[in-house]
Image (cartoon, grey):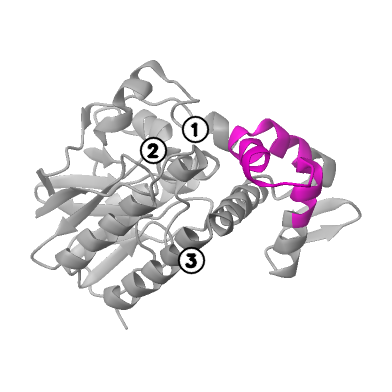
Amino acid sequence: MAHALPPGVTVFERGWLSSNNILIQGEGGTALIDSGYCTHAEQTLALVDSALQGRSLDLLLNTHLHSDHCGGNAALQVRYPEMETHIPPGHADFVRVWDAHALSYTPTGQQCPRFQLSATLQPGADMRLGDLQWQVHAAPGHDPHSVILFEPASRTMVSADALWEKGFGVVFPELDGDDAFDEVAATLDVIERLNPATVIPGHGAPFTEAAQAIAYARQRLNGFVQNPTKHLQYAAKVLLKFKLLEARHLPLPALIAWARNTSYFSHTFEQHVAGATLEEATQQLVQDLVRSGAARLQDGVVFDA
């Protein structure tokens, strides 16, 4: 079904290496929600510059601080030096001192150039973005400090990775050994109560069938709760696929070395995969990606597909 966005709201739907970017313009100013991955920063700048048509960007918001949502922050701060940057409060201290491990960039084997913050996005607050009043809601699960944004007049929701049309993002706290599936369920309950008419997800096109998406997400979550190993396998495939999206192609030994040096990946296998070496397990995951059409293996080189 076609989606109707409120006036002044533009969605830049990106590939899976970058999150979607949402630009909001009005007499009250300009704001961008999420900035994509760092290797796409030039494209992010070009999209924003083109849409602003000479206006400045006043405000940058991050729904959470995974690298695909804030990797363009530094480039935007250089381009728009007067711009304010607001992030969820949970990781603010780590941004101030730039702890790449605590911010997840080292354990995921991903990049994010250092950026500065101006203020924090407080759950429970209202924010004026452009000419619209948006509510900030806590949305833990995928990331313990993630937020979602909701504009009640049009019932438009920016759901980040808490809800996609088909599922939700990897529940990263589970990879740290923390129980977070209940938080995913609670966040889905919040989204259901808000009853959005249009959902702008972190990845994929905006959609209007929120009830169907929530039902699908709950079914998927239940499968992970019943069999947590399924979630770990999903997470490992996502991390591998992200690396392939970034590198485009890597010799299989280099990909295995990356997996060994990426703590989320290696720790997952040490804790939960019995009877296989990390090398064997990585090769098996590569074969799974090849079978699903997400990768191609040729002459010992793994290609993104």
State which tag comes first along the sequence, 2 or 3: 2
- Label 2 or label 1, whichever lies nearer to me, is 2
**Secondary structure that dominates the magenta span:** helix
| Residue identified by numbered label 2 | 65
Position of 271 with respect to 62 (left or right) is right
Query: At 57% across and 51% down in the image, what residue appears?
Result: 232
State which tag comes first along the sequence, 3 or 1: 1
Q: For residue 281: magenta? A: yes
Q: CA distance from mark 2 to mark 1?
A: 10 Å
| Residue identified by numbered label 1 | 112
Q: Is residue 2 above or below residue 73?
A: below
Instruction: Give the SS element for disc 1.
Output: loop
Position of 172 with respect to 78 (left or right) is right
| Residue type indicated by callout 2 | Leu
Depth check, front residue: 155 or 128 = 155
| Residue identified by numbered label 3 | 223
The percent position of residue 284, horizontal first and vertical second, equals: 77, 56
The percent position of residue 247, horizontal first and vertical second, equals: 68, 45
| Residue 165 shows in this picture | no
